[in-house]
Image: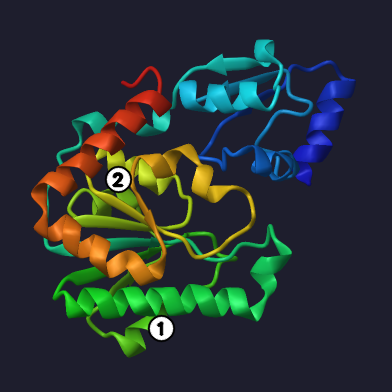
Amino acid sequence: STEQILLNVAKNQNVPIILLQHGYYHDDIRATNFNYFSGVLPKKSDYFLIWGNKMNDYCKKIDVISKKIKIIGSLLFDTYKNFKSTENDYVLLAAQGPTDFFISDLMNSTYENYINTIIEICEITKKLEKKLIIKLHPDPHELDITKYIVSLYPDVRVEKFGDIKNLIKDCELFISIDISTTILEAQLLKKPVISVSVKDYNLGDSNSQIFQSCVYTNISNLESNMIKIFDDLKFKNKIISSGSKFTNDYLSNQN
């Protein structure tokens, strides 16, 4: 709401406005109204500085005025190319929880599905004899399930704060819940990525470009996909290669 006020003040004072892309957004046409509502697309901004060609394709598709768009890339990821990545025997789960953007996120059933999915992932990794680290979203408004998960699974490490890059660089497999910018981070660090579909906002998630570059599955098929990545080197390398190609297309002017 503060940004909306400042946008109007700037417009009235003829101050140029630049909107920066700051994450990976839902990029199916069905997500367009939500993207405008949440402020990640330019309504009153004079310029929209985006990360690369993939986002540009989406903007063209939804008729964002082309002269507003400037492809600049993102400084956020410039350090990744020189970041030494290793591989340990743990699975990293980026567990972004329900937000306050959607009415459906406030329903008990949404929270139950989210928590049950995480419990199922804990069970699968335990069965496969893999260590598990869960990285929660640092937003203080998001549900903190640390005590609950650790009480059920004392061997699982749960982190709320800190740089996820340091956790990604040493993991064997990266799992994300739904859409997350952390998928790009894992792909830049040459990790195989699985995204587990948990929350359906009817924003065309299954058509999102990022899910063409990783394994996109529901919880019932997660275990079989994990086993395939652990046991089938050719399949694992194919997923890593697909992720690298996607980040090269999505992020312009790297380094």
Residue at mark 1 to residue at mark 2: CA–CA distance: 26 Å
Residue at coordinates 26% horizontally, 85% vertically from top-left?
154
Element marked by disc 2: helix
Residue 50 in sight from this viewpoint: yes
Type of the residue with mark 1: Lys
Mark 1 vs 2, N-terminal side: 1
Query: Is 203 situated left or right of 78 in this image?
Result: right
Marks 1 and 2 in Cβ contact (< 8 Å): no
Which corner quadrant holds the C terminus?
Answer: top left
What residue would you read off at disc 2?
186
What residue would you read off at disc 1?
147
Whole-percent x and y of residue 157?
A: 28, 73
- In the picture shown, does residue 226 fall above or below 13? below
Residue at coordinates 44% horizontally, 44% vertically from top-left?
181
Q: Quadrant of residue 132?
A: bottom left
Q: Residues within 10 Å of mark 1 (few under 14, many from 20)?
A: few
Whole-percent x and y of residue 63?
A: 71, 22
Query: Is 42 situated left or right of 12 in this image?
Result: left
Type of the residue with mark 2: Ala
Whole-percent x and y of residue 215?
A: 33, 51
Depth order, front residue of 237/134:
237
- In the picture shown, does residue 123 fall above or below 41? below
